[in-house]
Amino acid sequence: MKELGKKVLAGDIRAASRLIRNLEDQIPETNIAMREIFAHTGNSHVIGITGAPGAGKSTLTDELIDAYRKKDKTVGVLAVDPTSPFTGGALLGDRIRMLRHAEDKGVFVRSLATRGAMGGISKAVGEGIHVMDVLKKDKIIVETVGVGQQEVEIINHAHTVIVVLVPGMGDEIQALKAGLMEIADIFVINKADRDGAGKLYKETLNMVKMSKDMGDNGSWTIPVLLVENVLEPNKFAESVKALSDKIDEHYQYLVDNNLLSERMRRKTAAEVNEALWGNILQPVLSDLHSQGEMEKMVDKVLSRQTDPYTLAEEIASRYIKKQA
Amino acid sequence: MSDRRIRILLAKPGLDGHDRGARVLARCFRDAGFEVIYTGCHQTPEQIASAAVQEDVDVVGLSCLSGAHKYLFPQVAKLLQDEGAGDIMVIGGGIIPDQDMQALYEAGLKAIFTPGATLDSLVEWINTNVKPRA
Amino acid sequence: MFTKELLDKSSLLRKKWEDEVKKVVAKHADQKEEWSTVSSLNIKRIYGPEDIKDMDFEKDIAYPGQFPYLRGNQATGYRGKYWTFRMFSGMGTAVETNKRWHYLLTTGQTGLSTAFDFPTLMGYDTDSPKAKGECGKCGVAIDTIDDFRDLINGVPLDKITTSMTINPPATALWAMYCASAEQQGIPLNKIGGTIQNDMLKEFIAQKTLMCPPEPSVKLISDTIEFGTKYVPRWNTISISGYHIREAGATAVQELAFTLRDGMEYVEDAIRRKGLHVDEFAPRLSFFFNSHIDFFEEIAKLRAARRIWAKAMPERYGSKDPRSWWMRFHTQTAGCSLTAQQPYNNVVRTATEALAAVLGGTQSLHTNSLDEVLCLPSDHAVQIALRTQQLIAEETGVCNTIDPLAGSYFVEALTNEMEEKAWEYIHKIDDMGGMVAAIEKGFPQMEISDAAYKFQQQIDAKEKIMIGVNKYVEADEQIEIPLLEIDDSVEDEQLERLAAVKRKRDGRKVAECLNELAGACKKGENVMPYCIEAVKNYATVQEICDVYREVYGEYRDPGIY
Ligand SMILES: Nc1nc2c(ncn2[C@@H]2O[C@H](COP(=O)(O)OP(=O)(O)O)[C@@H](O)[C@H]2O)c(=O)[nH]1
Ligand SMILES: [Mg+2]
């Protein structure tokens, strides 16, 4: 356990997957390892792929891996699927689309369940990205299921966000318009073989143009790409190669305009917040719980002997030493 | 605070495509609260072992009905050993004649399930035998 | 169907009977609340005239050899000819399987049927890394035409029909058959047999995968066209529900998906090849499962004939009644057999075989009692074959045709199967056809749902399997003489293949494969190119690699 950080730094896959597992399981000691590796992060290009279930995200990711391997890039994938709210179990079905890369040492695919997290992304995803980063993956692809508002979360984690749309969901796109425009750096119209792909393509282009007219998104014009039918492998590969070029172009744009770290600001703030919470509030709370004091405090507030505000001040003055 | 879940990789090594059992099990394990990674048919032992390591699963469940289990199951167990992942349990299911059992256990398989095992008994086996990782 | 008078009378008597039932049930409750088929189709306590009152005797029932062929295609039924007793066999090397075939022909079997090993089924040669450990395990290994000649050695190809259970590499294996026949001096129009060659059910159920659905269907249309023109006695496809059922489908799903698959092939051959439906449809054949629920299976098979007879003229403008005939082979359900108390399997198989016969099958394979435990022994195969002979010649069920016709229950159940099947068929039509439905994962998901539900019912003992969840024998030792394939078979086969590769003209092989690739790219019929290639000792895998290269490889999308 203690060695985990060092092993990950040395590129040990087994240790890395174990660390991600511990992060998912929220084992407190992961802090030790994360502390060790953090200084070595910040080098990968993080690509988010989001869209409705069945939109073809995993199929696309599989081909993207291929495109990047042909460009001699190493790839990490974090593929997130939902946890069943009823049983807590999950069927993680993304990996099956990426099996042909199973033996390629330059590719590391990891499936994660949402475990009830909001936004379709668990906390472990953000940290898992750091782990992949330390493993020196040039490109880290994060596949998340996004429906409506929940898609937005991915923007905190990725430099380049790809929103995958498919024909046959005509009305929904109208409803999603606002949210999608906010997060997409690239739109992909997938399953171009299906009826309505052309129409969806035009609609999306229009949408992009309208928001451009309103002065959104700085100087990056959101491209809309059609991806060919997966069942015509050669054409499919070609259009995904074009997508990878576009993704790289976006990365270059971020670099050229000094926007790379800007994109990570929110994530970093959240991480600092999280760490503070974990280091300051969490120990206090567990202390109060284990002493049975929490229950007593609740009782007092319930019976109106005191109020939450006064209590909080008392606790704060007990635990936090004010510095002069 | 911690939130441990059992993770299982289900795979069908070899060339037979009779995946009814594997598909049913995938659903059953999900409903039992496990996280299941199903890798489908026609996997090589190398692919399975590599996936198991990357996914850090507790258990690899193999299903094979073609009669090639004598080569395929031990091979997965061996590859996991080689990758320093011998702690990942390998269990198998399918049409496994009694006389093959001994050799499979010796090769490192932790349990073999033959036709007729109930879903409940499988879930129970996992719940009793898979210790949460520390 | 009935006069008003009769229906009134029936309703009166029925009321009386219902009152009686109520009284009895109040005292002695039924053994269980719900009574349903193995596929969870609810069955009523009794059926009467009112359950089939809307049937039209002429349009819906009629006589054998008459539309809608509910009662059979042939006017004479089994009096003219029993079904073909066709037992599936194959193991180890071609030479061994050939020996087994000669044995089977002496036991009264009237048709041969080949099981190939997994590498052959998937289009890999024995020397492929993917084939390791699989050679000869569940069938015979065929790499080149040399193996094939050994397989059919001494079998009169113009007299015995041979069925080959082969799918993605069907063109290659059929080409070997055609080439071998020619070399024996038997013209193509004299040979008869069947290749399974049904890829849609592979995507749906059995997962013997090679290329994507669309080019897979194209290759099948090639064989249909080639057969229509040059090998008219050959069944170029056996549209199979068997595997769909084994994957966990219900009887209705098996019926619906299989028939919709058949329609997809018909549509493709018409559209792609410009054939008229009546040029090829008479050679289409089907392959069903016969499961343990006796009446459900009989109803399913009868319904299948009626649906097809209606669909062909209605949907495709067929004029030739031979196109309306649904001809099918049946195999008893492997998935109904148990490893526990395996001798009970003889009883299961007999029941299922009887259902198939009462459903009017034209050909039958009965499983051996040890089939769950892999390759069957000679003795077990003999019992299975005798089961068929016994049904045919002892039981008297063949004395009259379609003896269950007119049964209130059987007709009502047949109608219900048909209605429910049409619902599925129309749903798939709406999705844009079977290929589109498969791409959406629709039939796969339906089957997975059904399979999971059934397993839960078994666990909850709502459905019973003797020896598994009831009348279980504690500490049962399963002692079946197992037939095992020696691992030396693999080495032997590797050596044979290496020898062929040494002696053949490599340049000529490459040339043939090149031409085959060209034909694929141009959309030409591949069959003549395949025949040329196998004559020059191209291997099964080499031919399949051409397909994989040109059409792309298809992997299991893992829909559950
Ligand atoms: N028709 C068509 N189907 C596709 C295409 N891409 C993916 N699919 C299919 O859509 C289904 C869902 O794909 P998947 O990648 O798992 O979607 P995800 O849930 O978004 O990850 C699979 O059956 C794919 O084969 C495409 O371009 N055309
Ligand atoms: Mg996915």
Image (tube, rainbow, N blue to C red):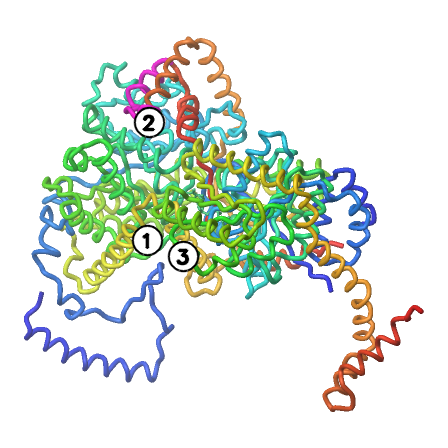
Q: Position of residue A194 (x, y in %)?
A: 36, 45
Q: Upstream in the sequence, badge 1 or badge 2?
A: 2
Type of secondary structure dominating the magenta stretch: helix
**Left or right of residue C5: residue A266:** right
Q: Which residue is at the front of the view, C460 or A188? A: A188
Q: What is the chain letter for disc 2?
A: C
**Left or right of residue C407: residue C93:** right
Q: Secondary structure at mark 2?
A: helix
Ligand 1 quadrant in view:
top left
Q: Does residue C255 appear in the picture of this structure?
A: no
Q: Is residue A283 above or below residue C190?
A: below
Residue with the mark numbered 1: C253
> What is the C-alpha distance between the residues marked 1 and 3?
9 Å
Residue with the mark numbered 2: C171
Task: Write the start and end of the magenta stretch as one range.
Answer: C521-536
Q: Upstream in the sequence, badge 1 or badge 3?
A: 1
- The amino acid at mark 1 is Gln
Q: Is residue C198 above or below residue C303?
A: above
Residue with the mark numbered 3: C450
Tell me whether marks 1 and 3 sit on the same chain: yes
